[in-house]
Image: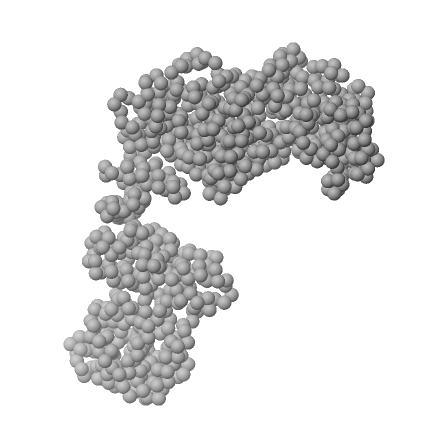
Amino acid sequence: MVLFRRAEELSLSHALLDGCTEGNAGLLLIEGAVGCGKSEFLETVAARAEDRGATVLRAMGTAAERGHPLGILRQLAADAPPGTLPAPPSPPAEAGRVGAMQVFAAAVRELGAAAPVVICVDDLHHVDELSSRYLLHLARGSRHAKVLLAFTESVHERAEDPLLRTELLRLPHFVRLRLEPFAPEAVRAMLPDRTEAETDRLYRASGGNPLLLRSLLQDPRQRPGEAYTQAVLSCLHRCGAAAPHLAEALAVLDGLASAAHLARLTGAAEAAAVRALAALDAAGLLAPGGGNGFRHPAARAAVLDRMDPAARTALHREAALLARAAGAPDTAVAAQLLAARHTGEEWALPVLCSAADQYVADGALAEAAAALQLAREACPDDALRAELAVRLCAVAGRTDPATAERHLLEPLAALAAGRLAPHAMGPLARVLAAQGRIDESADVLERLAACGGRHPGAERRHGDIPGDDPLDGLSAFPQWAASTRRGTPADAGPPPAGRTARTPVHPAALWALPMEAEEGAAAQAAELFLRGATLAEGTVEPVVQALRTLLYLDGAARALPWCESFVRQAAERGATGWQAVFGGLLAEARMRLGDLTGAAGTAEDVLRALPAHGGSVLLGGIAGTLVRARTAMGRPEAAAAVLSRPAPAALTGSIHGLGYLRARGHYALATSRFHAALGDFLDIGRHMRRWGLDRPRLLPWRTDAAEALLKLGEARQAERFLADQLTTRDAADPWVRGMTLRLRASLREPKERQAMLAKAVDDLHRSGDQYELARAMGDFGHVLREIGEPARAAMVNRRAWHVARECGAEALCVKILPGHTGDTAEAAAPAQTPHADLVASLSESEKRVALLAVHGHTNREIAQKLYITVSTVEQHLTRVYRKLEIPGRQALPVDFHLGVAEFV
């Protein structure tokens, strides 16, 4: 693509051609930085002259030919019509005589008698000394001849002999034309089909340099590529002999580059470095605003990639020493150390660690991890290596939980071998506890307590946790956590065999729910905390604790929007590891609401977004949520595919492992492996009791075990587990009580079963878990048919079927109404939701009565639940039928979601 110059530049050259045609000699010197279009402009002048019948003679100076006398003159003679210009004299002594120069000048003037002669010499600064004297003699003696001399010269690389340029300046017909880089508006004018944003981006990458701009337009999507790289290297090569070597130092130093630093790093004189920087800046290669770094990262990369690896490493090492001596920021010094893989200086490790902290604060996680990894590789001290591994774990956890967990393998191995110093154990226990790896964290704390904490007289290291409790400070949400984190959990009882009571705190306490008396205040405090919380290093764990508090104490519906909010925040920060943490909670919240499709989709999104290599304790728990959702949806093959993936060994003994065990147990139940399911559920119970986390709100393992026992025909054992669950502190929770009553009803006679299932339906409706509600309603419909109430049973089963379908539980739909599809007009008509205006016309009392009727309750049962008379119930229903324009009870819509307040 041709990039046109400004009209005034072209008009000047046209005027000189016109004067030449009229017998007035011209002398044009075209100046500009490298890549600014001097050669192209000279060729434009030549082509214009040829179009007007002029004889054009071309020659080009090069650095290689500068030492060959009369090289330019030979090029001009060869380009002239045969026999018109004399061949240059062979002996240098003869060639340097004035007579030989006069002969050459006369021949040119004679050639111009027939038609104007235009002599174009590119790169005048590379012309050999003898040829320059011939050209100067021709310019002096041809003022009234039809001869135009047009030269180009780089403004930053003058000829070694200043005589030619000085003498040319004295001639009256001398004209100088300076070609500048294109301004932003010129780039926009040349590319009218591009948007302003596109042309601005092209200008920023090229600096208006025509050569760089043309290369960008040749590269795919007009972004720096191979053509741009070659253009950059071409500019450097033509900026002078010193420029390439100085550009290498510039690329290594990057933002630290200054003329003094470049001179010191290359061994050049500072004045030469100043000139080279000016040339690079004029060529549009340097960052604007006086910065001495490259304008575009691709330009820097082009220089670095062509360097010899050993030379580049040595230069980075020298740059690190220079940056340190100059008082540069630790991040700048660390960047050089990383590039050189150099840690030989005594200050290298502290600088790398300090730089890692700053990198994390700036969100440069890859650089932080690289700095810590280099420090870790070079560190000879096991304790400090363990601390660095813990810090690496924290950094990697932001983007890749599996990699974060692998960073702990070395300190855990050192601990097992007895090589880990006590002051390194606290940080290790802390990060293990935050990851939910309860048994491993407890084991570290056990060893710490056994050796009396820190070695006598040992100094505190960077990263030590202040205070006697290594888990202090893990939560910034202490309103409720303080009471549960001191000592072992309240339900844990005495320390298990093999553990000592000297352990300062049990890590399971970090995952415990508050005491019953504090639950209301804890949920309120959690939401208050979340309103002011933003994601950053150090806030993830307390945010997770607050979300879990809302999820398990205040209901999934309350927690879900908060989970969604923090998933978005993590995604905006590019923190895929944090996104997995909050995505796992979001999937669990959706599972608790019975949204099987949403839970499965969220869990799959989390697992898909993370690197495929390796396993993770956190991801094991999320995989468990996915398995439970797929199993409940009636897709055991999909669940089996997830379970077939290798699970990390650390999953056992972690809080996330409990969810995985429960999922595997549910899959075993669905595939008729009842003994295997029971084993998994009982393992959960043993872990939860041992850790002091035995709260059905967290994980109702007793109902799971009871369901497996019922499948095995062990009714008495099942009853014992269910009765035990109703004696726990969570027995009054609607979700816990509803699931327990549903299973317990199966052990009762039909009449008692009906009453128990009615209570279960009410409880599960209040809990918000639509899947468990559908299961309870399906059982309720079955018992109604069993006791001889087919009309009520049909209505309840229709409602249960539609709720199950909304959850995505296809297998449950088949169980409730085998063969029913909901596609017939008879089935679809009752499911139509009444118009919003009609629903709004109902009073709150009428809504309560209507919803209980939809759930299959008789008028007497509704009256008892709402503490009103049967007559009042009948009056309410009559008004409901009239307002909703339906004939009666059987026509009440099965998806009658009216947002009714909780039942008494």
Residue located 42% across and 37% down the image: 537
Toward which corner of the image does residue 797 lie, by quadrant? top right
Residue 278, horizontal then vertical, whole percent: 28, 62
213 vs 890, left or right, is left
Q: Is residue 446 visible?
A: yes
* Residue at horizontal 44 percent and vertical 61 percent from the top: 200
Query: Given the current orientation, which residue lies at the most extreme left position?
Result: 93
Q: Nearer the viewer, residue 22 or 560?
A: 560
Residue 502's spot in the image, x, y percent?
38, 16
Residue at the image point whose x is 73% and y is 40% from the top: 840
Is residue 370 visible from the viewing direction of this image?
A: no
The N terminus: image quadrant: bottom left
Foreground residue, 340 or 602? 602
Looking at the image, residue 898 sits to the left or right of residue 309; the answer is right
Count of labels in the image: 0
Q: Position of residue 519 (x, y in %)?
A: 54, 25
The residue positioned 20% from the left and 72% from the top of the image is 162
